[in-house]
Amino acid sequence: MQKVAVQTSPPADELPIGRRVRLKGQVRYGVGDDLAIGYAVDLSISGLGLIGSQRFAPGTRVRVLLHLHTHPEEVLELIAIVRYSSRLRIGLAFVDVSVELERKLLDCITTAENISRK
């Protein structure tokens, strides 16, 4: 029986560009209104790594509701493309991010970096 390689992390040329920080936060994600609960493990201005039970094929466009610890009263709604999916982790790349959402993501990243330095 021939062995088949399974990709468990994204190729280097598909990694989102930008500062990436470890992050803990609840995420709801899925297609349309059918959203699963997951947990963010890292965040960059261009994407998100999460742990969750719902899997999607790479290339799938998903809706993401992100609860940021820097703005607990606010939920950010983003659209993302699945870059990779393994048993343990899902990698998402954000698309069509507005300037306002980008600013909020950057604020969260900066806050998380400052917390980790303490």
Image (cartoon, rainbow, N blue to C red):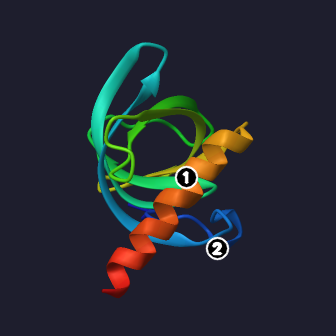
Quarter containing the C terminus = bottom left
Q: Nearer the viewer, residue 80 or 83?
A: 80
Q: Name the residue tied to disc 1.
A: 105
Q: Is residue 117 above or below residue 9?
A: below
Please tell me which of labels 2 and 1 falls first in the chain: 2
Spatial CA distance of label 2 from label 1 is 23 Å
Q: Given the image, on which type of amino acid does mark 2 rest?
A: Ala
Which quadrant would residue 54 be assigned to in this image? top left
Depth check: 26 or 108 in front? 108
Q: Residue at x 63, y 51 (%)?
A: 103
Q: What residue is at 51 percent from the left and 38 percent from the top?
A: 57
Q: Could you tell me residue 95's position as x and y percent?
A: 69, 40
Residue 36 at x, y percent in the picture: 30, 28
Q: Residue furthest bottom?
A: 117
Describe the element under mark 2 as helix, strand or loop: helix
Residue placed at 53% from the left, 30% from the top?
Answer: 62
Question: Which numbered mark, 2 or 1, is in the foreground of this view?
Answer: 1
Horizontal side of 47 relative to 51 (left or right) equals right
Return the residue at label 2: 12
Please determine whether, in this image, residue 42 is positioned above or below residue 86.
below
